[in-house]
Amino acid sequence: MKDISLSARIIGSFFYSPLTNENNKAAIEALFNDYINLDEPFQSFITEVRGASKDALDQDFCLLFEGAGIMPAPPWGSVYLNRDNILFGESTANYYQFLQENSLELDTGMQEPVDQFGLMLLAISQLLEVNTDESIVKTLIGIHLFPWCFRYLELLEQHAETKTYKQLARLTYAWCSDIKDTFAIETEPNTLYY
């Protein structure tokens, strides 16, 4: 579980902050130093990100995560799960309640939806680090993340302008598939509206 927690924290940070921020650059260098022990999707991503232009990565991050205009792959669950594609929808409220019930705080200092993909991975990491009941982690993943995340990752890969973010989407899709198998999570089919 420690490896899952660490990978959730690293990937979550890659989806929450620009790859060019200091914490992510340090994580990328640490991964590069352990390159030989990484799975293939991580190796391809590290190779790609280390050769990418800072300006191109920052521009792609802005397009994909900050919402300058119409977002081709919104990173918030409520957009996919709400008929009107709104932020702070019913699914966000349900997820927020889940976080409160499990004493989990994701205080980013900003008023933003807590169902942002990267934040949700960071929440998984936090839950695993406190050795919480595995069923709570499975609920977070199976009820709040998996109903929409695979669609989101497909859109992210399709609309990313850099190979780096396309590769990040692919490796995260594979990681989520592995997590689904590891925790034996069955998800009920949901109607997605985006």
Image (cartoon, rainbow, N blue to C red):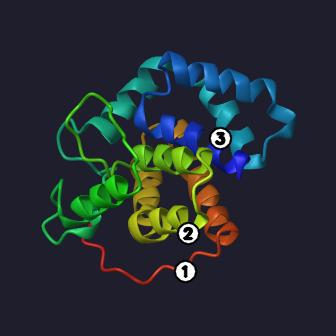
Q: Residue at x 40, y 24 (%)?
A: 58
The disc placed on residue 186 is 1
Residue 96 sits above or below residue 16 on the image: below
Outermost residue toward the top?
22
Disc 3 crowd rating (10 Å Cα; few below 14, some 14-19, many 20+) is: some
Residue nearer the viewer, 145 or 5: 5
Give percent across and percent down for residue 15.
Answer: 45, 40
The disc placed on residue 3 is none
Q: Is residue 79 visible?
A: no
Q: Regarding mark 3 in the picture, which secondary structure is present there?
A: helix
Residue 71 left/right relative to 3: left
Cβ atoms under marks 3 and 2 closer than 8 Å = no
Residue 83 left/right relative to 126: left
Question: Which residue is labeled 2 in the image?
Answer: 135
Q: Residue at x 42, y 30 (%)?
A: 17
Cβ atoms under marks 1 and 2 closer than 8 Å = no
Question: Which residue is labeled 3 in the image?
Answer: 6
| Amino acid type at image mark 2 | Ser
- Gap between marks 3 and 2 measured at Cα: 19 Å
Q: Which of the image's four quarters has the C terminus? A: bottom left
Residue nearer the viewer, 129 or 174: 129
- Disc with the residue nearer the chain's start (1 vs 2): 2
- Disc with the residue nearer the chain's start (1 vs 3): 3
Nearest to the eye among marks 3 and 2: give it.
2
Q: Residue at x 27, y 35 (%)?
A: 66
Q: Residue at x 49, y 35 (%)?
A: 13
Residue 74 sits above or below residue 98 on the image: above
Residue 76 left/right relative to 171: left
- Gap between marks 1 and 3 measured at Cα: 23 Å
Give percent across and percent down for residue 168.
Answer: 56, 44
Give percent across and percent down for residue 97.
Answer: 28, 59
